[in-house]
Image (cartoon, helix red, strand yellow):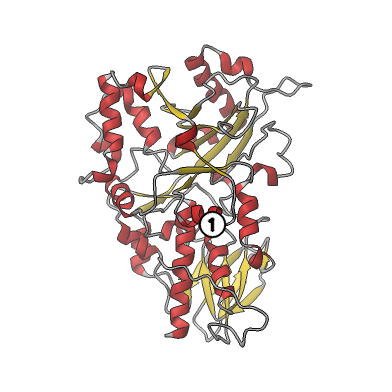
Amino acid sequence: MPHLLSSCGKDDPGPEVPYDGNVVVIGAGASGLYAADILKAKGIQVSILEAGNQIGGRVKSLRNQKDLVNISAADFPVELGAEVVYGSDSIWGTNLKNFKVNTLDIGSISTDRYIMDSVSKTRDDWQIDGDFANAQSFVDGLPDFSGSGTVAQASAGLSNRVKALVNSQIGNLYGTSNEKLGIAGVAEALKARIYDNQKLVLKTNPMQDFLIFRFDQVRELVQLNTQVTAIDATGEKIIITDANGGQIEATKVIVTVPLSILKKNVISFNPGLPSAMTSSMSRIGMDHSIRVVMDFKKNFWGASTGFLWGGTSFPNCYSAGVGRGEFNQTLSITINGPKAVELSALGADMINVILAELDSIYGGQATQFVRRDLDTGNVLFIIQDWGKEEFIQGGYSYPMATATLADRENLGLPIGEKIFFAGEATDISGSAGTLNGALASGERVAEQLIKTITG
């Protein structure tokens, strides 16, 4: 996908794309910021409306949350949202490289461990186990899978011993569970990806800090705490109505809100959403998601460990300090789908469930070494419950059993040449559900909108 970035210096004769109208972007997440950045660079008048109280959307770093920053003792960035950058030559990977941001390739600095029968081992140590070997063969073969149905249906022949292991590496990783995730859609997306296999984390910079820095040129264009409730494009001007009854006029609008917000009709559209879009929405899901961060006084899971796969209450568990901090004693846990709903209902008591499972694997060391408040003795933890975030209401999008990339394309269908749609759920480059997917969609929609101006 071509990059549209350019800049207009103060001595330039005029905007690259002359346009008398104005564009309003709904949402100050990665896709909205990128789309606005491109349009502004082309000389187009643009503004951004954000329902929440900060920039970044599902990119949210602990260091930026003043009420939480002292809970973790980590001497490295701790992420409450997007955590891993896929591909050193991807859109975001290239941005990190261009701005000389220090990154680490997780695969080169750590070794993943896999949990089965309440035992944690490396892949090499487990490989002699036939059930494990079959499970990993299934996971490794995902890009070449040619069948249909859900991942659970496709993996039905695997031993029950590995069900949680496979769910953690596929269902939970892609935002849900194997019972709901469509295997054909995942395979199709993996085949469409064109960047390398590196998985990067930022060594010293919080992700949200870099996002804000990268899009500093449009930061001043963001109006926070402005929830859009209606978009009426039936007249010559588009009328955008916010939750307080205020109205803003625009010539064109780009909507980048999460799929969950669109599916719940939080915003009313006139004319209504295209039928092809609403039909495809029924095949793309967005489930509950939780990020839990806990510090320990001892790293009992292994100093060189990267990810722990195979837990049920902690299906995606990342040793966040590996290669990045002197105190490598923090676990960053991501729970998606039905398990996230179950734990969310427990509130803070979900921590006891997670600690109990860690204790069963590591001989009670989780409860023994978890960091506690010195005065009260209470466990210190951070829960970012994305499902309870009013303007997010979930994690990230995933394909259901019959979904294809064509459904992603339909989610990005414009209404006339006035209302356009972006966001990770609309990505057709194979990166839906990721920061790269959000950025790619922002790039796509900016190009799409510009073509309606230039012809």
The residue lying furthest to the top in this view is: 363
Q: Toward which corner of the image does residue 455 lie, by quadrant? A: bottom left
Q: Which residue is mark 1?
A: 95
- x then y, percent, for residue 233: 50, 79
Q: Does 368 sit above or below residue 446?
A: above
The kind of residue tagged 1 is Asn
Q: Toward which corner of the image does residue 14 lie, by quadrant? A: bottom right
- x then y, percent, for residue 322: 55, 31
User: SS of the residue at dot 1?
Assistant: helix
Q: Does 138 sit above or below residue 127?
A: below
Closer-to-camera residue (20/394): 20
- x then y, percent, for residue 138: 27, 34
| Apparent side of residue 308 relative to residue 46 in the rendered image (left or right) | left
The residue lying furthest to the right in this view is: 375
- x then y, percent, for residue 130: 25, 20
Q: Which quadrant of the figure contains the N terminus? A: bottom left
For the point 27% across and 51% down, the residue is 402
For the point 49% across and 20% down, the residue is 357
| Apparent side of residue 88 relative to residue 9 in the rendered image (left or right) | left
| Apparent side of residue 83 relative to residue 154 in the rendered image (left or right) | right
Closer-to-camera residue (135/378): 135
